[in-house]
Image (tube, grey):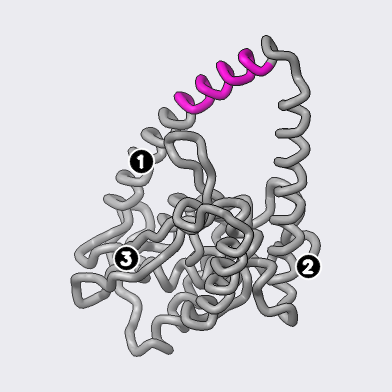
Amino acid sequence: MNHLARGSGSPFDRIRQVRPDGSEFWSARKLQVLMGYAAWRNFLPAIARAIQTASNTGMDVASHFAQSRNVVGRAQGGGNDREDYELSRHAARLVAMNGDPSKPEVAAAQAYFSERTGQAEAIESEFAALPDWARHQIDTIRRVGKIETEQKRQADQLDEVAARVESIEGAHDWFAALAYAKLHGFSTERTFLAKVGRRAGQILRDSGETPGTTQHPAFGTVNTYPEWALERAFGELTAVSS
């Protein structure tokens, strides 16, 4: 359990996202998978309890639990609109604390977000104790860092476009396992990707659909899967291998 939560190689670190302004968040949909919940509807009560706790303690719920929506493509075209939340570190910790205590994945999430919260509070405490000139210097460095973050975000967008062009043929948001791994920073090791493909195919067949195919210039005909199926498959297998 502990190795799920520890260090920069943690899957919770890999799903962390940073906005152009430098603020961080975690997608509730991605957190759902890493916390061992197979269905969104089963994860919603943990989010609801976390929101209630946040409200009771005076947190700004709208900013810490920012509602969002995204579209997941279907093989027959079009897509399903689904809800999501952009969770701040504090919000993600509350969700973890309100998860099913019998799940080892939930315990790993609790350990990870508790550790990150403690680290952040220690840094802020040290920052507040610095003299004014030092705080101003750090603020300047942070502003430069935000510019660099935005530049990286734009570069990542170009990489994403290239990967989408490389991997999608016909249906919107259907990916080869390799392209999805490149987009989201997962391992591209061939044996691991083969396992992901098999698991994504099983998930898809369980829902009454079948994998698609596309032509890759280097690999010939390859299977493609909808984003939601790959998200689940990568989440499950990453948690197992970590």
47 relative to 147, above or below: below
Secondary element at tag 3: strand
**Mark 3: few/some/many CA within 10 Å (<14, 14-19, 20+):** many
Quadrant of the rendered image containing residue 91? bottom right
Question: What predominant SS class does the magenta segment belong to?
Answer: helix
Q: CA distance from mark 2 to mark 3?
A: 32 Å
Q: Nearer the viewer, mark 2 or mark 3?
A: 2
Q: Tell me whether the residue at label 2 lies in contact with that at label 3, contact meaning CB atoms closer than 8 angstroms.
A: no
Q: Give the labeled residue for mark 1.
A: 157
**Mark 2: few/some/many CA within 10 Å (<14, 14-19, 20+):** some
**Residue 170 location (% of width, % of height):** 20, 65
Residue closest to the far right:
2
| In-front residue for pair 197/98 | 98
Q: Give the labeled residue for mark 3.
A: 174
Label number found at residue 1: 2
* Residue 65 can be seen in this image: yes
* Residue 187 can be seen in this image: no
**Residue 28 location (% of width, % of height):** 50, 64
- Residue 230 lies left or right of residue 161; in this view the side is right
Q: CA distance from mark 2 to mark 1?
A: 33 Å
Q: Which residues are magenta?
A: 135-148
| In-front residue for pair 167/32 | 32
129 relative to 213, above or below: above
Residue located at (48% from left, 25% from top): 148
